[in-house]
Image (tube, coloured by chain):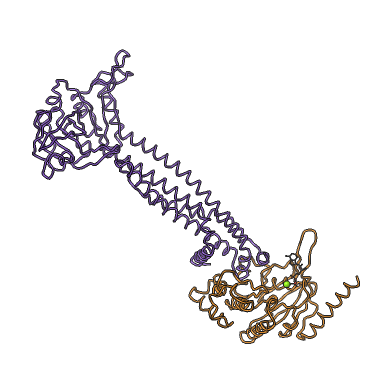
Amino acid sequence: MRLLDLVLLALKTLLKNKLRSGLTILGVVIGIASVTTIVSIGQGGQQLIQDQFANLGTNVIAVIPGSGQSGGVRQGIVPTLTPGDAKALAQECPSIKAVSPLVGAAGQVIGGNSNWKPEQMFGVGPDYLIIRNWPIESGEFFTERDINGATKVCVVGQTIATQLFPGTDAVGQQVRVKNIPFQIIGVLARKGTNMFGQDQDDILLMPYTTVQKRLQGSTFSNLGAILVSATTQELSRQAEQEIRAVLSERHKIAPGHPPDFRVQNTIEALAIMNIVTGSLTAMLAVIAAISLVVGGVGIMNIMLVSVTERTREIGIRMALGARPRDILYQFLVESVVLSSIGGAIGIALGISASAGLAALINKFLPSSNWPFTVSLPAALGAMLFAAIVGVFFGFYPARRASQLDPIEALRYE
Amino acid sequence: MALIELRDLKKIYDLGEIQVAALKGVTLDIHEGEFLALIGPSGSGKSTLMNSLGCLDRPTGGSYRLAGEEVAGLDRNELARLRNRRIGFVFQNFNLLSRTTALENVEAPLLYNRDCPRWERKKRAIKLLERVGLGDRLDHRPNQLSGGQQQRVAIARSLVNRPSILLCDEPTGNLDTRTSREIMAFFRELNRQDGLTVILVTHDLEVARKTDRALVLIDGEVVIDTKDIERAAQVLQRRMRSDEDEGEQS
Ligand SMILES: Nc1ncnc2c1ncn2[C@@H]1O[C@H](COP(=O)(O)OP(=O)(O)O)[C@@H](O)[C@H]1O
Ligand SMILES: [Mg+2]
């Protein structure tokens, strides 16, 4: 028999028994739908995490002051990082692309006719935007000269720009922080909210020296953190080691003693998160796949019943000249068509379910920004798997049908 | 060379404890274009012989040559091909595919004939259904047709691959006298006009009288093979009466 004839015959036969066909494929529908949903949701989560890490910047490594320890007594977090450390890292670590000191600040910003309290206020170095992979939208960023002179300039995010100077260009405008006038020299491009719902555009950046000298009025030159960007993702681990080596040397940490700083490698964290979410997804998908196998057994069961019920039909077809192989293919194709239809419905259901879930998450956690992803490979894979289930579980019944003796099948009551 | 050559054909059903010899060595020739009846009491092996002739069943001994080819050595696929191309079956209980239209029933054998292109199937099937007078019943299912109509669908189906032999196992067994006559007339037409070899099993002497040659089968043996149908009928009746007498005496 030709393939087209086989498929048409299968469809005709299955349509003659709509209810039974529907019930038969239910297991496969549920199995495929759950695989599709789980993989989609899993990938959505992974995407979300990846986006967040990308948001942090390119290959960011953060060095933060650690708990200094002397004589076995914990001293809590002490500010131990200096601009000299930052400079040393930039000069001595070959796997590092950019370095920026970071100091925190806080306060009201007064500008135009209103005031505003930015969520984030930092003093940073000129390379900060390179590390965060954050383009400037208008104006420019401060330079080494601003750092050296501790000049009264700042760069603001979109939120501040529109809050204080709606409808006008914020660049060139004056703002006051703690009564000190600052000039806005640049506005950052929009970055949106992060995983925790924080508005990342609600940010004000100024030279870190300015923060230290003018806002804190301190003579301490300690930093809140040093942000580092590794040259490439592959070199991030190496960069981390170089940082540890340089800082240990500078801070005179004896070998075997705990350092007074901590290195947080976001790339490593990302890799770990990826492994965790990936294996979680895989595990759930395997469980769902097991339900698919159960669905396959359901198909086999019904096909066996069908072969018995249709023994006379098989006998008649053999008398009319059907070869064993024609009968084998007839039942095999029926089973594959059944499971493939089940697979197609399952994929449609799975996609709707994951779209619905993504919408639901975003509705109840408005800040989460959960991405809805449909994995085409997963959908195609699921479809293929469904077809394979059909072949696998259809083969035994089909083979039984094809091995019937024509006369006995014809006489079957 | 005869179309069908049987030499000492045997069929023994092995039921474990006992063995039933349904055919005890049948030897006969059937030539192309013959129209013959196989008669005999119930259980005499008529159906067994027909199924062997139709390549549906395998004899357990002897030789069967169909158009010169020894059938015993063929595998299941080759037997299927013979059934598909050379042989048409008409059964007592019609054996139509249920829940399937008359047209699809007649088309069914063409599904297994790769030499018939798709587009030609419907054409051929409709032509045959028209020939058996069912041109207006193409979309009817078996349960929407009378017995006579169902048998005519079955005959159309048996002809669709243009076989050379028509094997009919009590084709009129389930039909009334008038319909039987119509069907017999149609077989005669097929035999005369199309040169089809028609072999039919019947226990109705009226039906047998319409054929050209009669074979009387008793207990798996051919007791008479003659063109004189009346003689065959007498032999059969005498044998059956003596069987009854034996039954009464014992
Ligand atoms: N499948 C079978 N198994 C065992 N015995 C059978 C089988 N088919 C037929 N027979 C026996 O073979 C003999 C001939 O049967 P059959 O050819 O059907 O006779 P007829 O068609 O002349 O009535 C009978 O005795 C019957 O019981
Ligand atoms: Mg019989």
Q: Residue at x 76, y 85 (%)?
A: B229
Front in this rendered view, residue B159 or B74: B159
Chain represented in orange: B
Q: Name the image quarter holding residue B221.
A: bottom right
Residue name at image x 8 percent, y 39 percent: A172
The residue at the point 87 percent across, 77 percent down is: B242
Give chain A's shade.
purple
The quadrant of the picture showing ligand 1 is bottom right
Q: State how many labels appear.
A: 0
Measuring from the top left, give residue A335's x and y in whole percent.
Answer: 53, 58
> Which residue is farthest right?
B249
Residue closest to the eye, A181 or B65: A181
> Horizontal and vertical percent for residue A92?
22, 28
User: Foreground: A374 or B149?
Assistant: B149
- Residue B71: x and y in percent read 67, 70
Residue B60: x %, y % from top left:
73, 66
Residue at the spot 12% in from the left edge and 45% down from the top edge: A167
Q: For this view, does B211 lie left or right of residue A19? A: right
Note whether A111 is above or below B228 in the view shown.
Answer: above
